[in-house]
Image (spheres, helix red, strand yellow):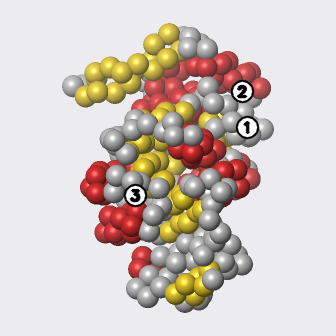
Amino acid sequence: MGKRYSRRQFLMDGTVAGFGALLLKGCGVSTPSDTASESPAASSGLKAAIVLPGVITDKAWNQAGYAGLEAIKAQLGAETAYVEKVGQAEQVEVLSDFARRGFNLIYAHGGQFDAAIQQVAPQFPQSFFIGVNGAASGTNIASLRIDHLQASYLCGILAAEMSKSKKLAYLAGQEFQATQEELRGFELGAKSIDPSIEVSSSFTGDWNDAAKAKEAAEALISTGADVIYQWLDNAAPTVLQAAADRGIYAFGNTADQLDVAPKAVLTSAVKRIDLAIAKLADLAKNKALKGEVYSLGLKEPTILYLGKFNPAVPQPLQDKVKQTADAIVADKLTFETCTEAGKATRCVKGAA
């Protein structure tokens, strides 16, 4: 049977061809219809939703999050819904709305949602909130992290070996724990090859603004950086193409992005966050999900790994990077909590 909503228009899974999910008009996402058919009761009793900061067609972070939701639907028979393009001001309202509508597993797709999760979760104990890339935890709060540092360490080695200027750069949308750890790993990997190498960083404040990303990339290149490790969403192709146009190297992120700029991309830090999202949903279905931080790294080879290598990367260097990855998986090379310059961080212990 159909159901009509007034202030917000919800399009539930399986109701409108080409969408099959929830769109929230109140967050500036247009809807093609004012009517919505309710999906059949989920066989698993699981109702999962995801709140996304960007669009599901970005071929990066947000698309991977949406793919995770689709996996939950396909594998666990859950009723699923999503909302995209949620800004900082709408986070609390959107998370609360999903909880009020009976969704018992709610993903907030990005570390920038941590404060909103911590505000909303205590009000809705019947729902479990998962901050993807977050750092929050609580009775009904879990954080799901990819160990970005492990992959960026490998990329740092590769960047240092391929750089001629010995100046590298890191470019991301926002500065929070996950991006700081990724930057740290990139620095550690590079300095394991050459302690004198320089690594600069820049944060655009927007994961999807291509103009800001291009401007930031050009500024980094103008300082002499000849390898850029980027973590952006819709804006990523702009940075990769800028690198190609200027004759320097870059790294893909989240998806295997070698094909986006074949001349520039050395390899990609592939993060199958979709599989990680589905993994935690399976725990929830089996009532095994806990209020803690779940960190998945190279020991989960289907979730975190390096993508295709550029033919410009010599085979001995590819072998060296792979050998280092094997050492991390075998715990011969680990990253322990330490203090540096008065701040908590992670340091390398052991050797490849």
> For the residue marked with disc 3, what is the amino acid?
Thr
Asked if residue 108 can be seen in this view, the reply is yes
Q: Secondary structure at mark 2?
A: helix
Q: Secondary structure at mark 3?
A: loop
> For the residue marked with disc 2, what is the amino acid?
Gln
Give the position of the C terminus as an image quadrant. Answer: top right
Instruction: Answer whether labels 1 and 2 touch (C-beta < 8 Å).
Output: yes
Residue wearing tag 3: 204
Residue drawn at (47%, 56%) of the image: 104
Residue wearing tag 1: 309
N-term mark: 3 or 2? 3
> For the residue marked with disc 1, what is the amino acid?
Phe
Q: Secondary structure at mark 1?
A: loop
What is the C-alpha distance between the residues marked 1 and 3? 27 Å
Percent coordinates x, y for residue 1 in the rendering: 63, 83
| 276 sits left or right of 133 in the view | right
What is the C-alpha distance between the residues marked 1 and 2? 8 Å
N-term mark: 1 or 3? 3
Percent coordinates x, y for residue 288 in the rendering: 51, 36
N-term mark: 1 or 2? 1
| 71 sits left or right of 233 in the view | right
Residue wearing tag 2: 318
Q: Which sits in the foreground, 153 or 66?
A: 66
* 305 shown above or below 219: above
Q: Which sits in the foreground, 192 or 5?
A: 5
Q: Which sits in the foreground, 87 or 149?
A: 87
Percent coordinates x, y for residue 312 in the rendering: 74, 37
How would you rate the neighbour count of disc 2 (Cα within 10 Å): few for under 14, some for 14-19, many for 20 or more?
Answer: few
Q: Which sits in the foreground, 222 or 143?
A: 143
